[in-house]
Image: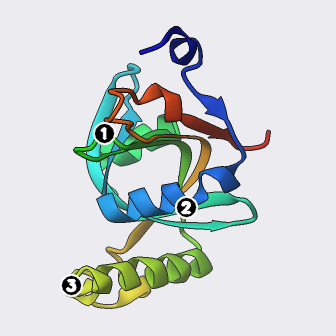
Amino acid sequence: MTSASAATFSTEVPFADLHDDFLRLTTEIGWCSVATVDGKGRPRTRILHVSWETGDGAPVGWVSTSRSPVKTAHLARNPYVSCGYWTPAHDAVFADCRARWAEDDASRRHAWTLVAAEARERGFDPYAVWRDGAHDPDFNVLRLDPWRIQITLADLARGETVASSRVWHAPA
């Protein structure tokens, strides 16, 4: 690694500069490691599938998930999560987000449309799990609003990753 690339770990960019790589990698990888924090400040990681969409210059993630006692307690104490995606080629996406349960009918229907479409594309019948679709009492939705996204694309030919690390922050 050269000293010039060591001096700059990442470059701040507008989301438009991350958009294509963000959607490509999160879609290709599919499963995401999502960490919450417990009441003592300790992280807890689980695997979830996030359906991402973009609009108004920023991404929004939708997760169909159970309201497990642990996840529910963690999010009640601290609504921030960290999402990580990684490929064996060392391409990585990290999305730090504010999470909240989406309980209104419009959000649940919207999330169902996205989640069900992705499930069918992957050969999975979402009605096998949620018989009543968006109205199923076991269909719970988390909305993720990122405040920071980092994408690192590996440059394996040079043995470096830091030169292509790009970061976006949501407007305050």
Q: Which residue is mark 3?
A: 123
Residue at the far right in the pictured view? 172
Q: Quadrant of the N terminus?
A: top left
Q: Quadrant of the C terminus?
A: top right
Quarter of the rendering containing residue 171: top right
Residue 109 lies left or right of residue 64; in this view the side is right
Label 3 vs 2, first from the N-terminus:
2
Label 1 vs 3, first from the N-terminus:
1
Question: Which SS class for mark 1?
Answer: loop
Foreground: disc 1 or disc 3 = 1
Badge 3 density bin: few <14, some 14–19, many ≥20, Cα 10 Å: few
Badge 2 density bin: few <14, some 14–19, many ≥20, Cα 10 Å: few
Which numbered disc covers residue 5?
Answer: none
Q: Position of residue 86 (x, y in %)?
A: 31, 44
Q: Amino acid at mark 2?
A: Asp
Q: Amino acid at mark 3?
A: Gly
Question: Which SS class for mark 2?
Answer: helix
Residue at the far front in the pictured view? 157
For image coordinates 52% across by 83% down, the residue present is 109
Which numbered disc covers residue 90?
Answer: 1
